[in-house]
Image: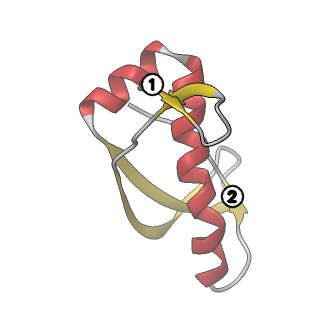
């Protein structure tokens, strides 16, 4: 993270989250129901920052989750969306 100022002068933090998102596959949720699974990989420094900061972890999960609805629209059939963070 680094300090940043947006065009209207407000200050905050700027974050770059390089990640790789794998292809969709079917999996099972905790109740045994079918769900879609997307593996994603982040850089070691990103993971370290996320593990040390609940706010950063939330940002990483929200960034990936923002892409998932687009991927879900491309899928056939109906599935529940399961989000699980693993190390």
Q: Quadrant of residue 75?
A: bottom right
Above or below residue 26? Residue 3 is above
Q: Quadrant of residue 1?
A: top left
**Which secondary structure, mark 2?**
strand
- Tell me the CA gap for discs 2 and 1: 22 Å
Above or below residue 6? Residue 75 is below
**Which secondary structure, mark 1?**
helix
Label ID, residue 60: none
Give percent across and percent down for residue 80: 73, 62
> Image point 60% across, 31% down: which residue?
58
Give percent across and percent down for residue 86: 45, 34
State the residue lying farthest toward the top: 52
Give percent across and percent down for residue 79: 71, 69
Residue where numbered disc 1 is placed: 50
Residue where numbered disc 2 is placed: 81
Q: Earlier in the sequence, mark 2 or mark 1?
A: 1
> Image point 45% across, 24% down: which residue?
50
Which quadrant, please, contains the C terminus?
top left
């Amino acid at each position: 993270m680094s300090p940043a100022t947006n065009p209207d002068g407000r200050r905050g933090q700027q974050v770059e989250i390089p990640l790789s998102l794998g292809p969709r596959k079917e999996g099972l949720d905790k109740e045994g129901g079918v769900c879609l699974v997307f593996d994603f990989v982040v850089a070691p420094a990103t993971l370290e920052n996320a593990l040390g900061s609940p706010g950063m972890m939330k940002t990483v999960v929200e960034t990936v989750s923002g892409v998932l609805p687009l991927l879900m629209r491309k899928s056939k059939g109906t599935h529940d969306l399961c989000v699980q963070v693993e190390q």
